[in-house]
Amino acid sequence: MSRPHSVAVTVNGRRYERQVEPRLLLSDFLRHELGLTGTHVGCEHGVCGACTVLLEGEPVRSCLLLAVQVDGREVTTVEGLAPEPGTLHPIQQAFWETHGLQCGFCTPGFLMTLVPFLAENPDPSEAEIRQALSGNLCRCTGYQHIVDAVLAAARNARPR
């Protein structure tokens, strides 16, 4: 049996230190060690995108990373998107307004993929949005309302 490793990571602006098994997945660390269950685990192979989080601002599949790989780094989960309790991030608000979710299982992964996408591309075309979302799977919506949510979020972020 391997011995635990010390991990210090900043998640949603808060620093955590834990002793973890070397093979502990980041998704399991977030969910079971930190209680941040907004990161969903779907396929466990990096295909569905439900476990997407931001690692230093870049979207990554947390089911493909080990917790020890994020030692000393910064992670943002869906729980860290809203600017303050009781509020929604603009992309969350757009999903709510355009019915961009149904069961909601895939939604955190979509949101975490879209935040950096919209930061880099504030005025995307529908084709660019569909390309950006091509690594995230949804079994409920048919994607049109998700695309509508991204268009609404981009439109709402523009200066008036």
Image (cartoon, rainbow, N blue to C red):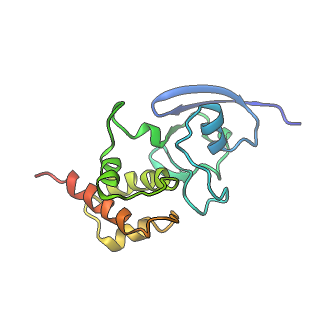
Outermost residue toward the right in this view: 1
Q: Which residue is nearer to you in this view: 124 or 44?
A: 44
Which of the image's four quarters has the N terminus?
Answer: top right
| Residue 31: x %, y % from top left | 61, 38
Decide: is 137 above or below 30. Answer: below
Q: Nearer the viewer, residue 68 or 83?
A: 83
Q: Nearer the viewer, residue 57 or 139?
A: 139
Q: Nearer the viewer, residue 53 or 95?
A: 95
Residue lying farthest to the bottom in this orientation: 127
Residue at x 85%, y 36% (from the top left corner): 2
Residue 73 in the figure: left or right of residue 153: right
* Picture quadrant of residue 29: top right
**Residue at left offset 64%, top offset 48%:** 65
Image position, residue 152 (x, y; %): 26, 58
- Compared across the picture, whether 157 is left or right of 121 comes to left
Residue at 55% from the left image edge and 58% from the top image edge: 49
Q: Position of residue 50 (x, y in %)?
A: 55, 55
Locate residue 3 relative to residue 45 in the image: left or right: right
